[in-house]
Amino acid sequence: MRQIFTLQLLFSTIRLSTPLVLAALGGLYSERSGVINIALEGLLLAGAFTAASVTYYAHSPWVGLGSAIIAGAAVAAIIAVACIRYKADQVVTGTGINILFIGLPAVLSGALFLSSGSTPQIPRENLLPVLSHFLPFMPAWRIFTDVSIISLLALVIVFVTRYVLYRTPFGLRLRAVGENPEAADAAGVAVNRMRYVGVILSGALAGIGGAYLSIGQSSLFTRNMAAGRGFIALAALIFGKWRPVQTMLACLLFGFADALTIQMQGVAKLPSGEDIPVQFIQMIPYVVTIVVLAGFIGQSRAPKALGTPYQKEK
Amino acid sequence: MIELRNITKRFGAVLANDRVSIKVEPGTIHAIVGENGAGKSTAMRIAYGFYTADSGEILINGQVREIRTPHDAIAFGIGMVHQHFMLVEPMTVAENIVLGAEPGSAASLDLRKAAEEIRKLSDEFKLSVNPKATIETLSVGQQQRVELLKALYRRAQLLILDEPTAVLTPQEVEEFFAILRGMREQGKTIVIITHKLSEVLAISDNVTVMRDGKVVGDLKTSETNAADLARLMVGREVLLRVEKPAAKPGDAVLALRDLSILGRDGSKRVDSISFEVRAGEIVGIAGVEGNGQTELIETLAGLIPGSYVTGSISFEGCDITQLDARKRKELGIAHVPEDRHRRGLLLDFSLAENTILGVHYRKPAVSADGILLDQKGIQRRTEQVIRDFDVRPPNAALPARALSGGNQQKLIIGREFELPPKLLLVSQPTRGVDIGAIEFIHRKIVALRDEGCAVLLVSAELEEVTALSDRLLVIHNGRVVGEVDPTVASNEEIGLMMTGGSA
């Protein structure tokens, strides 16, 4: 046991939760405005690929991060136009985006880097920095200062989101259009404009999450590197009842399950002394997701207008 | 204050407003009456920017103005309270009131300042409500006050109220009218859309009557009366009272003994009720909605699982407490549900398919072999219902959704009457139904009674239960708090019992 529950596990959890938190918060802005965002997976991939490609050429993770934000927002804008303006089915649109971003990076990396699906390695000094980069005078605290700057940013965004949602006119309007767009309209709120903002913000945040995957946690983009995190983020958003802090906690739970998997491999033994087959250990995050979703989702109440386009009669 | 001039509005093939002109004088209460679909709400929704007119113009204080969105209307001092409240249920009163017109800066919402202002307005207009309460915890009467405050908070000078009394008890209506009169004294102008003539006469200064999308009358309220208004609305003479001979009650058909019903949350919705309904009489149940009527009727129809029910229900002397809905229907218990969209119809199914609901597994819907639907039999039954109950348009292939509320209701009533019933459970038979159809439905119910059927009637319309019932039970908090003779008791007396006071 002592080999499993280490400080390592804690920081591993933070690392693995970071992209989940960013994607889930993105989803929160979109879904609170009433637009289902099942495309978080695709948005993560868009952000990851853009960040890695741009950083490779620009030699600056900040330019890469900025591009990932723009790319995420741009892809989300496509979703927004389709779902808000043309009232396309939100689930179908999102699924289309997800499929697109399994294939598109492969095509582009073929064109740009003559490779099939991944971008070239980026040198370590051009990756998104960890805290020790800013705190060189604290070498003894390596384990703390090894946390990525993006993890810290994600934490800040959680609380900013909470403030925006509950303490600003923007947040009030966003929640209102997701719950009862007719009422918001009658009160003089421009429903569709709010929804555009919500969806595009979700792309920007998922873009940051994607950048973290490719130029924070690793040093290149690999094919399908989001590996279902967009969907787990969606599950966390639902489990967190579309509330920022609870959603973050849900992401931490899923991140923890993931970290546990890594930590237990080759360490956890059966009472007989044999290793637990690795396949069973790798099942943990998925089992946790299913149990959590099946067990608790019933109590979660979605924004009432989630998934329905606002049709104003003319 | 506001004037509509030659407003025309088309929805597809339907001409909803045909050169409608309405002039509302400042500082008055102006009623707009008409049957469902007459175009009253459409005209007012145009004034509030929810719809844009195809042609015509809107004048505010004598000047032509363009109103494209509610936002524009609000800027011109127009507020509207919709029939279905436009409130965000999980949010607080204060949040709902300020939504779209928030105090404070963009970076911070000043709800404390809002609450202060709301309190000031509540005092001024006697609309007490707690700004911190969540909408879903409020009664409909309180929610309505929130709607009024919402308009007042936006400094509305003109308030448009769409069917505001539909959800209120008689007492609440009185209070509500007092509030409206108070607002008029403070210089506000009020437009009230309604189809209840008694209310027009009680509250308005002027009245505009609409029919089939046109204005058919513009009158001073003091110079008109209910009969004239009804004639204008419907286009023919209308009988406003129910004509019925005295009941000749026979044996008890339905008998309840200490019937109690639990809600899903475990609370008692109906608390040891006992009464009888005899053949050939109409027993009415008066009460504020949500006092157990729904549970009672649904339990009698067999729609609530037996595990929630204690006590006994007997029908023609046999205990039916444990029978399911189908068995009860086979015995001759018909049910006209309170919510025709939820329990009464499959809106996307044809009139024919809807007509055989409940008898879909036996004759005449199924052929002799019991396997195939008998299309001819279904057609015959449907045509009969359509003819006998004057369902319009008379086309069995149309989806139920295509019918007006009144015609949907006539179809359901026709279907249930064809059972044929020995006991009719009927809830809100004329909710959202036009005066003409109300008259028709009332006559049919009385005729069924005279054929010897027992009728249990629930209605939120006090006038309806008192007019139709031979005996009237008053329900409050799941208990029968009294029985009155509807020909003797006054509305005030019954209203007081409904709210828990003693008569």
Image: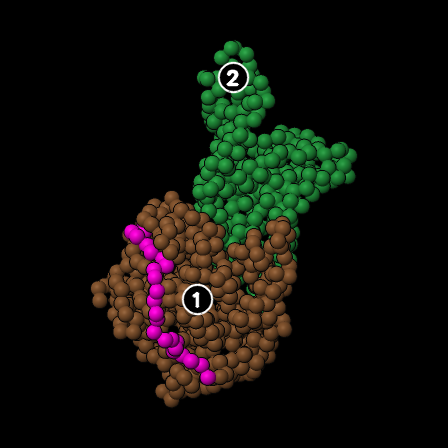
Chain colours: A green, B brown
In the image, is residue B110 part of the stretch drawn in magenta? no
Circle 1 — which element? loop
What is the x, y in percent for residue A34? 53, 52
- Mark 1 belongs to which subunit? B
Q: CA distance from mark 2 to mark 1?
A: 69 Å
What residue sits 64% from the left and 31% below the top? A219
Which quadrant would residue B132 be assigned to in this image? bottom left
Mark 2: amino acid: Ala
Q: Which quadrant, please, contains the C terminus of chain A?
A: bottom right
Q: In the rendered structure, which segment of residues is drawn in magenta?
A: B237-263
Q: Which residue is mark 1?
A: B429
Between B108 and B248, the one nearer to me in the picture = B248
In the image, is residue B253 part of the stretch drawn in magenta? yes
In this rendering, do the residues under marks 2 and 1 share a single chain? Answer: no
What is the x, y in percent for residue B295? 38, 54
Q: Give yes or no for contact between labels 2 and 1 (Cβ–Cβ under 8 Å).
A: no
Between B444 and A223, the one nearer to me in the picture = B444
What is the x, y in percent for residue A52? 66, 36
Between B401 and B146, the one nearer to me in the picture = B401
Marking on residue B368: none
Dot in front, 2 or 1:
1
Q: Which residue is mark 2?
A: A268
What residue sits 54% from the left and 79% below the top? B212
- Mark 2 belongs to which subunit? A
Left or right, A42 with respect to A109, comes to left
Q: Residue furthest left?
A: B502
Mark 1: amino acid: Pro
Q: Residue furthest bottom?
A: B223
Which quadrant would residue A65 be assigned to in this image? top right
Mark 1 surroundings within 10 Å by alpha-carbon count, few (fewer than 14), some (14 through 19), many (20 or more): many
Left or right, A222 with respect to B226, comes to right
